[in-house]
Image: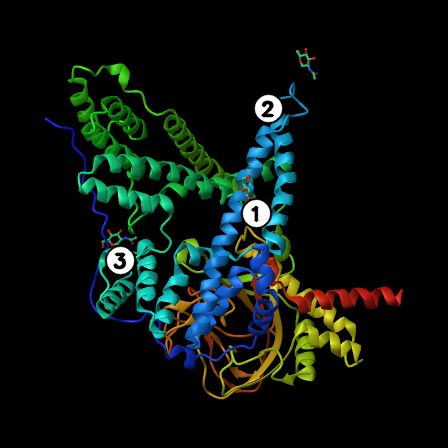
Amino acid sequence: MKPTSVARNVSMRSAALPVFRIGTSLGRMLRFTKYSLVLWIAIASCGGAETEAESGRSYVAYDFYYNEGVAMYLQEGWETCVKNLEMALKGWHWWHDNTASCRRNCSLEAEQKELLSANMSEEDRYFERALYSTHCLVRCKKNALGPQRDRVVESNVISEFNNRKPYDYLQLCYYRLGRVKDAANAAATVLAVQPNNTVMSNNLKFYMEQAGIKAADVVNLELKPYGQEYFKATLAYQDNNFGLTITLMEKSLRLFLEEYQTCRFLCENPFDQGWYPDFISSVANHFTFTLRCKRKCMWQLSELSGEVDDDFLPSFFDYLQYSYFQKEETAKACEAVATYLILKPGAEIQTHNKEFYLALDEVNEDMFVPRKEFVAFKEREDYEEELMEFIETNFAFLTDEFWDEEDDELKRLSGLGIRVVKAARKAEEGVDRVVADGLASTLECLVLTELTRLAAVEGDGYKGDFSPHTPSETFQGITLGRAGLMIHAGLIDKAALELILRVTDRCRDYVERHFHLPRQLYFAYTHLVCRTARPVHQVHVDNCILQDSGECLRVPPAYTYRDYSAILYLNEDFEGGELIFTRDRSGLTHELKVEPRCGRLVGFSSGPENPHGVLPVVEGTRCAVGLWFTQDRRHSEVERTMATLFLKKLNKDEL
Ligand SMILES: *[C@@H]1O[C@H](CO)[C@@H](O)[C@H](O)[C@H]1NC(C)=O
Ligand SMILES: *[C@@H]1O[C@H](CO)[C@@H](O)[C@H](O)[C@H]1NC(C)=O
Ligand SMILES: *[C@@H]1O[C@H](CO)[C@@H](O)[C@H](O)[C@H]1NC(C)=O
């Protein structure tokens, strides 16, 4: 009998024919909202290139480069696509390395600092350390990250980087530039986290055939050092080179622990509580946010070749026990078996191996002592798992109570005569939608309609070509900024602007309460618009670009930060103009049709779950207030802030 080991297949996958993910005619199909980013980046990279290199700092955040790279991809600017996406990836790594490094250094510094309060309670000491750590972090981040230290990157961009989406764009841009080897590596990098992406595996196969690249030469560009050593170790193992296997596995194991710690540090991110909890609740809340993230580190690091390997960490000790045994280092082999069994109690093969080793003359039970750091490791893993379970079971209930309080707010709003006509909730029907009446009085409707008609300037509101209105419609509208200018010019009274703000605030509050949103909604855009129309309409989604395939691309020029949308109708003396929710892009059939009438609000989540369109206005003019909301404060409407300040100033001047 011999100790056994599970052979592991770590080779690359392969597949069939070349297809590309996004039709390249898309660049021509889409026209772009003009934004000044191109210019800004151009300035930043001429003026800043040298100083950036000197100081090691980057002044342009990686998400800017990313958005720019994607825009260039869509416009088929292959060279600028590559340049921007490479900068984006570089910036991403740079940001992560420095952030993790600061957090690691400062945690260590605070740990070693002598406390004022040797005799104080554990809690006092904890917060004293937190202060030292913070003091250190502020300095470190300022020094290492410069102007980017407090940058908050949108969560969808973060998850796209984690899913290797930039490499998805890059592979095609490389290919178009004739850089087939780079294209193959980029495709392999995508496949390492998306093994079932058949388009990408077809592309990889195509690139490999075209350039005669061998599977062994294809590189996962995001493979971390511990992964590189792990692969080398498994190759040594397959060659029966056990001495080398031991060296490489031990090295990989050390690197793995470091990477694991880095992953945990990278979870200690800012968190928008969205409400105002008590001090301790706020700490607990933020702690939960980081814990949830940290619990994902193990599977993130266990995904070397596209599949999460549940036994990844134990597998080190499988290779090690067998290799140590082969090198006749029986004590080390026993230690490896014991460590395996700590990480995975009762594992069959290692239990069997232990029996095998025990049967040897020189082995006794006392030799099965697991490595100390892994005993501690496992203890923490189990503890956090338990804590997470407590959180999940006990706090769902608290959340319900929280909503009950919020319902009082809803009742208060109902006191205004608001009545829900029709509603659908995510949990029940898969979509967030509500139609409610009474959000504006007859008088308010009348004033706003007249104002919109009076102030209408053709084309205002939708800058550039990306407009929810169909090309064959004429539309007229006013924004808050224009309303401010009109007051300034003496065309309208400031009461009109106050009315717009009051009515739209009411709508925002209603949408927020109705959907029980845990995070505050900010206005992203407010637009009063009257439409007269010809018989065409267009089904679209508010925060992504709907494709014929049904896929919805969350890329610029779509307003990706929009989370909720609403329309408040102002009049009903026209025909047609109903809002429809439909999955049918022709708009011939629909799931829900809403008849406009004064004071009726339609609110819905802005994502692909709510494709919608407007039926043609057949006769007359339809006036409404279009409202888009975001949960990301950085995208809150500048015009609204300006309008509010302007009103404040006017009111002050009058005093
Ligand atoms: C963290 O400490 C190490 C070692 O002292 C140092 O080399 C590194 O630059 C520090 N990291 C940062 C971001 O300052
Ligand atoms: C800490 O407590 C010990 C024992 O109670 C006492 O002797 C010592 O003076 C205290 N130290 C300080 C700094 O208060
Ligand atoms: C990929 O497909 C396989 C087989 O169809 C499935 O078992 C696996 O869960 C899929 N993996 C991912 C990451 O979707």
Q: Quadrant of the N terminus?
A: top left
Q: Quadrant of residue 263?
A: top left
Indicate which disc residue 217 carries: 3
Indicate which disc residue 270 carries: 1
Pointers 1 and 3 in contact (C-beta within 8 Å): no
Pointers 3 and 2 in contact (C-beta within 8 Å): no
Closer to the N terminus: mark 1 or mark 2? Answer: 2
SS at badge 2: helix
Q: Quadrant of residue 54?
A: bottom right
Q: Is mark 1 within 8 Å of ligand 1?
A: no
Tag 2 residue: 122
> Looking at the picture, how far across and down is residue 437, in whole percent?
57, 66
Asked if 257 appears above or below 24 in the picture, the reply is above
Q: Amino acid at mark 3?
A: Asp
Question: Marks 1/2: CA distance?
Answer: 25 Å
Q: Is residue 93 visible?
A: yes
SS at badge 1: loop
